[in-house]
Image (spheres, rainbow, N blue to C red):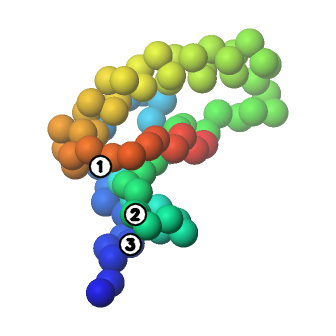
Amino acid sequence: MLNNTVPERITSLSHPLVREAYLKKDLGTGHKDKDVLVIETLDPDFDDIDHELFDSYLIDLLVDLGDLKNQAEQKVGSFDRVDIRY
C-alpha cells in the first residue's frame, strides 16, 4: 500500500508574510504518519536586516499563526503540527 507523499498545496491561505503553504505527510519511524502544515515565508534579506526588524517579522507571523491554522483547517482538515520555513 502506497501513502500519498505528494504535498497538497493550500492556495486559499492568505497572509502578507506567507509565500506558500502546503500539507505534507511526515513519514517518521512511528506507528502513525503525521500530517504537517508547512508555511513558507517570504525571504527577507537577512544580511541587511537588523535583529529588531527580524524579531518583529517573526512576531507578526506568530501572532497570526492561529488564524493561519484556522484557514488551513477549513481547506484541508486537521493536521498534527506546523513547520515554518523561510
Which percent across, then down, holds residue 49?
76, 24
Residue that appears at 57% across and 44% down: 85
Q: Nearer the viewer, mark 3 or mark 1?
A: 3
Which percent across, then down, holds residue 1?
29, 87
Label 1 – label 2 distance at C-alpha:
23 Å
Can you tell which mark lies on residue 32? Answer: 2
Crowdedness near tag 1: few (<14), some (14–19) or many (≥20) residues, C-alpha within 10 Å: some
Using residue 72 as the reference point, say whether residue 44 is left or right of it. right
- Count of picture labels: 3
- The mark nearer the N terminus, 1 or 2, is 1
Label 3 – label 1 distance at C-alpha:
15 Å
Disc 2 residue type (three-letter): Lys
Crowdedness near tag 3: few (<14), some (14–19) or many (≥20) residues, C-alpha within 10 Å: few
For the C terminus, give its image quadrant. top right
Using residue 40 as the reference point, say whether residue 45 is left or right of it. right
16 or 67, which lies in front?
A: 67
**Label 3: which residue?**
5
**Label 1: which residue?**
10
Using residue 28 as the reference point, say whether residue 65 is left or right of it. left
Residue that appears at 78% across and 18% down: 51
Q: Nearer the viewer, mark 2 or mark 3?
A: 2
The reply to whether residue 55 is visible in this rendering is yes
Residue that appears at 45% across and 48% down: 38
Which percent across, then down, holds residue 84?
54, 40
Disc 3 residue type (three-letter): Thr
Q: Nearer the viewer, mark 1 or mark 2?
A: 2
Q: Quadrant of residue 6 in the image? A: bottom left
Q: In the structure shown, which secondary structural element does the residue marked by tag 2 occupy?
A: loop
- The mark nearer the N terminus, 3 or 1, is 3
Using residue 20 as the reference point, say whether residue 85 is left or right of it. right
Disc 1 residue type (three-letter): Ile
